[in-house]
Structures are given as structure tokens and as C-alpha cells.
Amino acid sequence: MKTNEEYNKTAMFYKQILLLLKDSAIPFLIGGSFAVFEYTCTTRETKDMDIYCRPEDYPGILKFFAGKGYEVQQTDVRWLAKVFNEEGRFIDIIFDTVNNICRVDDTWFERAREATVFDMPVSFISPEHLIWGKMYVMNRERYDGADVNHLMLKQGERLDWPFLKQLMEPNWHLLLSCFLLFQFVYPADYFRILPRKMFEELLERAKAQYDLPPPVEKVCRGPWIDQTQYQVDIKEWDYKSYTIKTV
């Protein structure tokens, strides 16, 4: 557990990063645990701050911080970079997801919400985009289902559900699974939170799958939600995997 001194140093690091980002004039958004707290008021210890930007902007952010004496890293050119200070504290620069499905584009900025962090105005990714990304995190080591439930519970009556459904196409099965999990977790709340018409439409689509012929290609989409546990399907059981987007 972090001491008060460590918390203060980390907070000062994040504050300095945000001040520098504002000075850089490169558009950015805050996500991760800071956004979850903003939308749900749930707190947890975090090892970093998630900064979102367009793919074309992350090289500029890295060059800017390198020029300020920070260590920068292209962690995964498909979606992630990092900025470190001399004490090893870091922020994540995120411009996509590891499955290359939730790529940051202009709509993220158009739908951003304004708030205050460390006494300065900042922009957060929208709750719809936050939920979208978290629906694909079902790893053995990390599962974001509780975050999705909490976001739906606290923001559901204000969510743009049609936009979230649009984001989840063609992987609408995951949205339906989140509806069912929410019903299970919150039996007294789903009536007012989940849009019934959308739920019924998703159920009908699921039922209609049985009227279709079986797919010719033996596909496993498991790697989209867990990049390690479904490797046996691809490497040993002759399933094929593919991504929606490539870089």
C-alpha cells in the first residue's frame, strides 16, 4: 500500500503531466480509473494515468515529453505508448485497444465530458466510449465487468444507448451479455436502467442466429476479449482468429 508521501508524489507527477499536455496543445482525453471515478465515484489504487489521443497524435506527445527530459516508450505500436519520470512513475498514452477495435477518432473528442482534476479543467472520454473499451476486457488476470456494471448503474439513465449499440456493432453479443449480467447483479434496478426495446431486439437477434446455417470458417473471437487464454484454440484446436482493423 502506498504511503501518503508516495500518493502526494504521484499526484504531483500526474498534475505536472497534465500541465505539460495542456502546454503542448495536442488534443488529449483522460480515461482509465480517473474516468471511472468521475462517472461512478468508485475509487481504487491505480498504477498510472490513462491518456487517450488520436493515433496520429501520439508520436507528437512522445517527442514533446522526450524534449522535456522524460523517458518515452513505444510499448505496442498497435495501441499503447508510455511516458516515465526519473522515479519510474508513468502514464499510458492510448490510441486504440489491443484488439484494434476501439480506435480513438474525432467522435471521442466530440462526445468528451468536461470536469476538473487537480484543480484544472480537463476532458474525459465519454461514458459510452469507456464502456465500449471495457466490454472487451475479459482476461483471466483482469476482468472489467464490474466497471461496466457500475458505469451503467450510475450513468445509465443519461447514456446515449443508441450510440453505444452502434459502437458495439457487429459484436452486439457482448452488449447483450452485459445486459444479462446487469440484470443478475441489479435485480431491483435494471427496469429503470436498461432500455427494454433494445434488450428485446438483442434477444431476437440472438434467437435468429439459430435460423442461420453454421459458418463455413471455424472462427474463435476469444482473442478479442482475452489475448492469452484463447491461444490454445488458435494454435492447437484449428480455430481461426481475425481482427476488425489492422495498423
Image: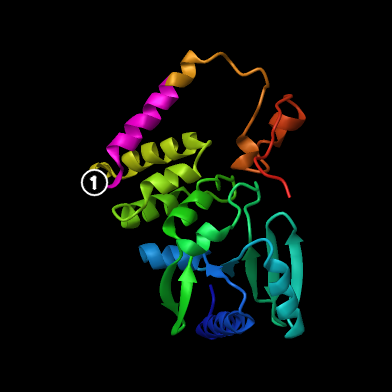
Residue 119 placement: quadrant: bottom left
Q: Position of residue 98 (x, y in %)?
A: 66, 50
Q: Position of residue 124 (x, y in %)?
A: 47, 67
Q: Which residue is mark 1?
A: 192
The reply to whether residue 44 is visible in this rendering is no
13 above or below 57?
Answer: below
Q: What residue range appears in magenta?
A: 192-207
Q: Which residue is drawn at the image coordinates 50% and 68% (left, top)?
A: 45
Question: Which amino acid type is shown beneath numbered disc 1?
Answer: Arg
| Residue at 52% over, 85% down | 8
Q: Nearer the viewer, residue 134 or 244?
A: 244
**223 vs 236: above or below:** below
Residue 114 colored magenta?
no
Number of other residues with Cα within 10 Å of mark 1, as a class: few under 14, some 14 to 19, many 20 or more: few
Asked whether residue 199 is drawn in magenta, I would say yes
Give the image location of residue 237, x and y in percent: 72, 24
Task: Please tell me whether the stretch drawn in magenta is mainly helix, strand or loop.
Answer: helix
Q: How is the image coloured?
A: rainbow
Residue 63 in sight: yes
In the figure, residue 194 lies in which quadrant? Answer: top left
In the image, 157: left or right of 50? Answer: left
From what the image shows, is residue 200 above or below residue 66?
Answer: above
**Horizontal side of residue 97 vs 110, given as left or right:** right
For the point 39% across and 50% down, the residue is 149
Res. 78 image quadrant: bottom right
Left or right placement of residue 169 versus residue 159 in this view: right
Front residue (pair 167, 145)? 167
Is residue 193 positioned above or below 174 on the image? Answer: below
Q: Is residue 187 left or right of residue 66?
A: left
